[in-house]
Image: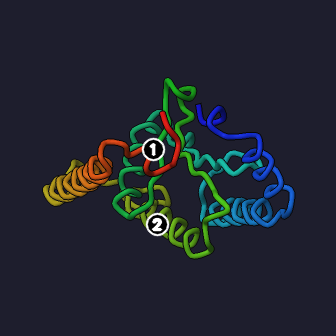
Amino acid sequence: ALAAALSEEDLLRALELLSSSTELRDRLEANTKGFRERMTAAGFEIKPGVHPIVPIMFSRFAPDDAPLAQRFARALLDEGIYVKGFFFPVVPKGQARIRTQMSAAHTRAHLDRAIDAFTRVGRRIGEHGGQRRGPVRRRDVGRQRKRIARWRAHAQQGLELLQGVGGKGCQAATGVQQ
């Protein structure tokens, strides 16, 4: 639908922009390489490759890999890092992972923050030899309730923003008619 909304002139401008410089591609490559190297040095198992989708593997914890990946992803969200845990049936059994994706828009500070959060969470829940946490504690339940309340507030703000532009949120925000 979006491609149909772009004119030939818009497409040519986009191609010209992409052809004029390799700065974004170079930055993406540097971010990807740096993240992969530093996460490996921190002790995380990473699927080999050079692409910007960097899977952090939990297969060495099978058969507990799926619940660990889920707990890890939730704990990272508490640290302000959004990642997605994947496990069976999305990936084969015993190959649970957390999917991260690098971007040219990420700064060194963003990557430092993410790697620090991975390391802190790993120590806290046992990835790096720390003790695994037992049953959910009351303070964890309170933390989850606060996080859900924040999500609801953000969703409500987004809905109000769309309604505030006369129900034409998509058109007003993008200039594209539906």
Q: Are marks 1 and 2 in contact (CB under 8 Å)?
A: no
Q: Is residue 62 above or below residue 128?
A: above
Residue 100 or residue 70, whichever sits in front: 100
Residue 46 or residue 142, whichever sits in front: 142
Identify residue for label 2.
117
Residue 50 or residue 178, whichever sits in front: 178
Which quarter of the image is occupied by the N terminus? Answer: top right
**Relative horizontal placement of residue 87, taking residue 132 as reference (left or right):** right
**Relative horizontal placement of residue 61, taking residue 121 as reference (left or right):** right
Quadrant assignment, res 18:
bottom right
Q: Which mark is residue 96?
A: none
Quick one: which residue is furthest to the top in this view?
A: 89
**Label 2, residues with CA under 10 Å away: few <14, some 14-19, many ≥20:** some
Q: Residue at x 49, y 23 (%)?
A: 89
Q: Is residue 176 above or below residue 40?
A: above
Residue 30 location (% of width, % of height):
75, 65
Residue 13 location (% of width, % of height):
77, 52
Give, as a three-letter code, the residue at label 2.
Ala
Identify residue for label 1.
171
